[in-house]
Image (tube, grey):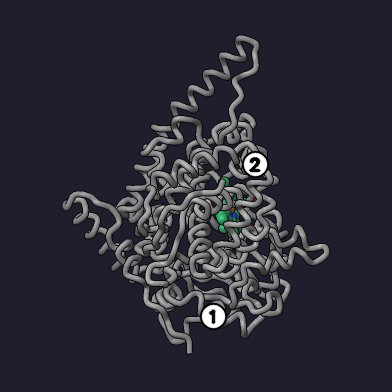
Amino acid sequence: MTTIPKIPTFILTRLSTPVQANLFTVQIAALVVTIIVIAAFVLRFDDRPYPGLEIVGKEGKTTMGAKWHFLKAAPSIIYETAKKTLHPYQVIALGGPLIILPADSMEDLRKDERMTFKAFLEKMFFTHYPGFNGFRSVSDSDIMINSIKQGLTQSLVASIVNLDVETAKALQELFPATDEWRETCFDEMGVEIIARLSSRTFLPEPLCYNKQWLEIAAKYTLDFHMGAFSLRMVPPALRPIAYWFIPYTWKLRAQVRLARKLINPYIDARRAEQQKAMKEGRPPQKVSDALQWIDNAAKGENCDVVAALLGYTLAAVHTTSVTLVNCFYELLSHPEYINELREEVITVFKEEGAWTKPSLTKLRLMDSFMKESQRTSPVTLIPINRVAVENFTLPDGTKVPKGATLGLPVTKMKDGTVFENPEEFDGYRFYKMRQQPGNEQKWQFVSTSNEHVSFGHGKHACPGRFFASNEIKIILAHLLTKYEWKLKDGKRPKVVSIGTEFMTNPDSKILYRSRVSEI
Ligand code: HEM
């Protein structure tokens, strides 16, 4: 029998103590939230299961009971069911019924436009409410996605130098030199490093170093998810009222206001310079940052650049930091790889003389280790999320109504018919697979496939993965050469699940001390 894990205290604390506010405001909000919760039981949620589809995880429970059960036990429900059926089924997730597609259907799904990620964002992340603007930039147009595909991707080579310099600076501050073993909270540091590196790449100087912006970069995503999570608990009819009384939504609106205050002067100055250059008949100053990539991708169309930048933050910071933190914890849990990876870093750097696209590509063991860590500890149980934009029928005859939520889970990544000894962590797994003829490209960290879906696959596969890969490799290279590391009491910080999301415990500590770097 599968045991149901308890929701960890640090998550419950986070759910129950969202923001500081004065006592009176909190009392009013608490009163309104109580009324709304009572009304929630009286009013209907629009979460009747889809007809004609098996429901898993509800057995004898009320809808609320099933939601709570899924919140606590989603991984065991999904992995266990994957062993029993190759057909679609539904679960009762917090946001209502969710159709779980068979892991084998990736090939069809990757081309299917009858269900879209945009519609999913709109339905689950309330993109039309103020404060949730970040994902509106993705759900309402292709500008933000195109700006990444064109601007960020073309700037990858140039951005490596900044990533290298910024990592050195960040580590000096976050892990001050010490000869004694010292405790650190790597969860927190991971978010901070990724927020700094992303900001250095996406924003102009000195804005990228602005402390208030960096705080938004590090915190907007979590507050965004908590805000959406709170709003999903309210019946749809009450959401327009409840929205104004959920403390997380106050925080989100404040973050968007502050982001506008910080970023708008740069946008205005940029546009003024462009107009001046046009008048003077000279080309405008060349710049390469997200403000410009977004402006270029908009091609004169109206676009909320600040919202799109918040969209960059939402897409980039949490995903990359969780991937980095998991990868690092995996490394400390398998210390036999530390020296091998360090040796690889030193050898490649000495051969190439700097971190560049070719030298990062030569870090083959690191690439394999990162991909294996993503396979064993993914960021989410369901990386591919869709909402049906029309009524349609799946190949097995399942009828999907317009508006239905669908997801494809990561179960294939632990499937023994695809990956030998799938429960075992093998840092060399993809290194060896790439040595097989014809497979050199298929199993790189950034390669997507029907079997390894951490970045999605097909037309909508993550366009930021090339950047994320460079970031993580450079950070690991610095961490390995400048410091020694070990787990506290030999224990790997636990990964916990809340619904379909995985996270590490932010209270976990690891130990480090300085070493003399060879490079
Ligand atoms: C390790 C870090 C990351 C992981 C694990 C990750 C994962 C994913 C996944 C699973 C998807 C959904 C694919 C689908 O629906 O088919 C996605 C989409 C997306 N990601 Fe990432 N991502 C990461 C980093 C980034 C970064 C750094 C950026 C931007 C700078 C980014 C921007 C996006 C965008 C814009 C989409 C939507 C693409 C579309 O709908 O066409 N991601 N990502």
Say which amino acid is labelled 1: Ile
Q: Is residue 378 above or below residue 164?
A: below
* Mark 2 sits near ligand 1, with its Cβ under 8 Å away: no
User: Does the image show residue 135?
Assistant: yes
The outermost residue toward the right is 437
Find disc 2 in the rendering and name its residue. Answer: 353
User: Residue 274, located in which quarter of the rendered image?
Assistant: top right
Find disc 1 in the rendering and name its residue. Answer: 55
Front: mark 2 or 1 = 2
| Residue drawn at the location 58% of the way across and 64% of the way down | 374
Count of numbered labels shown in the rendering: 2
User: Residue 342, located in which quarter of the rendered image?
Assistant: bottom right
Q: In this view, does 454 lie above or below 89?
A: above
**Residue 471 tag number:** none
The outermost residue toward the top is 280
Residue 224 screen position, x and y as percent: 42, 53
| Residue drawn at the location 42% of the way across and 44% of the way down | 172
